[in-house]
Structure formats: C-alpha cells, structure tokens
Image: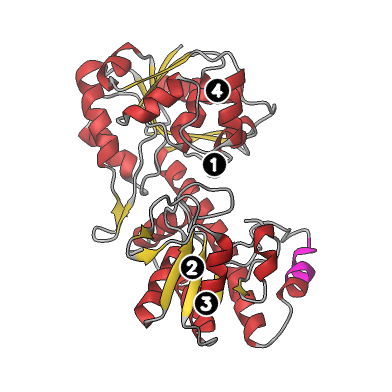
C-alpha cells in the first residue's frame, strides 16, 4: 500500500517507521532539516527504537517537503500534525489538520484519511460536515510516550479506530484495514482492536490521559501531605501500591504532570465538560496548579538568594521543554524575586529567555544556594546537600 504521513514528530515518524516495514511510506514535513535527516536515516527526534530501525531495518520510506505530491499518490493518508491547546479558545488548535485536509480535498478526495493528531470531543463530527467531499475520514487515537513512541507502536496496548457512521460498510472495512496495518508492523500478537464511533474514540484518548494525570496528581498530593508532616513518602506509596488493584505505575512524586499530552488533554476535557455536571476532571487541573504552588513555597522557605534550576526537559531522557512542569516552577520563582540560574546541556546559548545558563555543573552548583531538580540523576550526588527534589524512584 502507498501511505503518506503528514507530520514527522513522535507520532508521525514512529508510524512511518512502523508501516514502512511492509508498505511504501512517504513522510511529509515543512522543515527541510527533518526531511534531510530522515532520508539520511538519522532520527530528528530522540527515540532509541526509531534511531535503531532507521539505521538497521530495510524500510520503504522517503521524506519530502512536497505534501501535495505525496497525498496525490497515496491510498491512505495519515495526519499526525501538532494540535497545541489554545488557552483563549479553550480548545486545541486544529488548523494544521485542516490545512492538510484542504490539500487532500484538491488532489485526492477519495483516499482513506486517518487523523492521528489529538483532537477535542466532537471534532470529527464537525469535520464530516465541513469536508463533505471526503467520504473516508477516520480517527485513530495514539497512546505513545515521548521517547518511546516506536516501542509503544511495536507493543501496543490496544488499537482504536473511530468511524463516523458505524452502519457504513466501507468505513468499517477501511477501519479494520487500518487497524490491521498497525498490527502487522507490531511485534506483539493478539492486540485488542476496537472499531468505535469517532466521538467515542475521541473520549477514549482524552479520558485515558486524564486518568493518568489524575494518578500523577494523586501521588503528588500524597507527597505534599507527607512532606508537610515530616513523613516518608516512599513508605506510604509502596504500602499503597502493593495492592495489585493500584500497582506501581505513575506513582513517582514530581513537580506536577507536564509534557506534550497530559496538560493539554486535561484542559481540553475540562473544557468539554462545561455543560456536564462534574467535579473530578476540573479538580485534576486545579490539583496540578496547587502542587506547583506548594513546591515553590517549599523552595522559598529555604530563603535562597540564588536558585539553580537543574534541567528544563519535560522528563528524563527527553530532548525538549514542551509544557515541562519545571518551567512553571522557574517562572513562579522568578515572580517572587529570587535570582535564578539554569543548568541545561541542551541549551547552547549563555541565556535561556532572560535567565543565565551555566554549562559547567560544578560552577552551577557553587552559584546555587538551592538546586531544584524535578528528576535526580547520579551526577547530582556530590551536591545532594543543596538539592530540593521530590523524586523517589529516579524515573517518570
């Protein structure tokens, strides 16, 4: 099958690599440096499995800036463009999806189109009305972790495909065909597959991530209580998580949930609840803000003259700062008037925004009265007398 994929972020590129094992895939992006890297079999993003597959597997994969040409030649077009949450409109910015659909409408309206971008509940129904000349619009939510995107596609927990008309046999056939494509490239067998209505698929995505955010917020509130009363968070958490109904996942205290998915998905779901009686989903969002304010108060209670921010990345082994919880901590500390410095090897300049970046860890530690670390690593061991962190397990 000839497949075109719009967007080469974690979702798009991991899908491109997965599907190119058995099919002809053209990946489309607007950044020439990403196109050049992929064609040179170098991953433009940090993901161990993507890097390995690009270098060692026989993939039928090319990347291009020519979206129109790629879409025109494709039987299946996957849209995996970014949809950031817009605070003003209280909704995802879906303009990148619509820009691709506008091109497809001109060049290949009969293609099977699968949206993989994260979208608000009800969005697919609006697309079906707006793009009435595109009869085969599907939605398949992704459940990937940044830095492990291909791994999660190779070992999927489930495959969900949404269709707008469950009585339409052609849509049902295309949905099953797409699910089989994903399963074909995976390493696991007996993968649960569900073909559902598009609105139900949208809900699955947002409610799943909001549940994970709720777990993060729950264990953070537990840790807040323990810190305030001088208790051992680890002992409490492990005593709770030994219950097999609870388990040992998403239980490591942090400065708040962050990253590309959980913040925007919880905000979007909260917005979708505006006409529905609800207390829990809005409380998840509020709890994350409360946790960050508590963390800042604990840091300021140490009366530091200079606070050192150790790493800006959104989680361990990440290579970006998107919606990183520590970014909010940094800005709240700055608003308090305390002096700040940053240690972040990814930043090559001498400043980040208006804050000085110190590239030598020892010099950074000497300048800092308190070192704030959302996640600790071994390189901090010599400076632990200065470190403030709530990290217990050195993982996310």
- In this rendering, is residue 158 above or below 73? below
* Disc 3 to disc 4, C-alpha distance: 41 Å
Q: Which residue is mark 4?
A: 54
**Disc 3 to disc 2: CB gap under 8 Å:** no
Q: Earlier in the sequence, mark 3 or mark 2?
A: 2
Specify the segment rendered in magenta. Answer: 237-243
Left or right? Give the position of 86 relative to 252.
left
Residue 34 vs residue 256, the one in the foreground: 34
Residue 108 lies in what quarter of the image?
A: top left
Picture disc at residue 284: 2
Picture disc at residue 144: 1
Q: Secondary structure at mark 2?
A: helix
* Disc 3 to disc 1, C-alpha distance: 28 Å
Q: Earlier in the sequence, mark 3 or mark 1?
A: 1
Q: Secondary structure at mark 1?
A: loop
Q: Earlier in the sequence, mark 4 or mark 1?
A: 4
**Quadrant where the C terminus is found in the figure:** bottom right
Q: Earlier in the sequence, mark 2 or mark 4?
A: 4
Q: Earlier in the sequence, mark 3 or mark 4?
A: 4
Q: Earlier in the sequence, mark 1 or mark 2?
A: 1
Of tags 4 and 1, which is closer to the observer? 4
* Disc 1 to disc 2, C-alpha distance: 21 Å
Of tags 2 and 4, which is closer to the observer? 4
């Amino acid at each position: 099958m000839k497949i075109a994929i719009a967007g080469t972020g974690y979702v798009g590129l991991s899908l491109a690599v997965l599907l190119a094992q058995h099919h002809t895939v053209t990946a489309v992006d607007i950044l020439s440096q990403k196109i050049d890297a992929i064609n040179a079999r170098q991953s433009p993003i940090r993901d161990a499995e993507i890097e390995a597959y690009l270098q060692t597997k026989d993939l039928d994969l090319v990347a291009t800036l020519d979206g129109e040409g790629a879409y025109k030649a494709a039987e299946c077009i996957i849209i995996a463009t970014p949809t950031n949450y817009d605070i003003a409109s209280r909704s995802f910015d879906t303009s990148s999806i619509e820009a691709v659909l506008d091109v497809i409408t001109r060049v290949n309206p009969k293609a099977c189109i699968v949206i993989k971008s994260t979208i608000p509940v009800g969005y697919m129904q609006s697309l079906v009305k707006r793009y009435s000349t595109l009869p085969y619009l599907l939605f398949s939510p992704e459940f990937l972790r940044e830095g492990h995107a291909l791994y999660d596609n190779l070992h999927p927990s489930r495959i969900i495909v949404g269709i707008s008309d469950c009585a339409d046999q052609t849509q049902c056939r295309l949905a099953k065909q797409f699910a089989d494509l994903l399963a074909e490239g995976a390493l696991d067998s007996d993968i649960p597959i569900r073909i559902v209505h598009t609105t139900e698929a949208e809900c699955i995505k947002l409610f799943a991530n909001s549940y994970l955010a709720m777990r993060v917020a729950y264990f953070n509130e537990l840790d807040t209580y323990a810190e305030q009363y001088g208790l051992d968070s680890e002992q409490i958490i492990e005593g709770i998580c030994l219950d097999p109904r609870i388990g040992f996942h998403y239980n490591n205290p942090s400065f708040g949930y962050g990253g590309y998915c959980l913040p925007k998905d919880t905000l979007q779901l909260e917005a979708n609840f505006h006409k529905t009686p609800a207390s829990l989903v809005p409380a998840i969002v509020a709890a994350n803000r409360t946790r960050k304010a508590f963390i800042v108060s604990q840091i300021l209670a140490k009366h530091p003259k200079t606070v050192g921010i150790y790493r800006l990345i959104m989680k361990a082994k990440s290579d970006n700062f998107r919606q990183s919880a520590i970014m909010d901590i940094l800005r709240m500390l700055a608003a308090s008037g305390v002096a700040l410095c940053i240690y972040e090897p990814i930043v090559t300049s001498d400043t980040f925004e208006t804050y000085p970046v110190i590239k030598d860890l020892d010099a950074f530690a000497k300048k800092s009265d308190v070192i704030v670390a959302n996640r600790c690593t071994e390189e901090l061991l010599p400076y632990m007398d200065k470190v403030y962190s709530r990290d217990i397990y050195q993982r996310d």
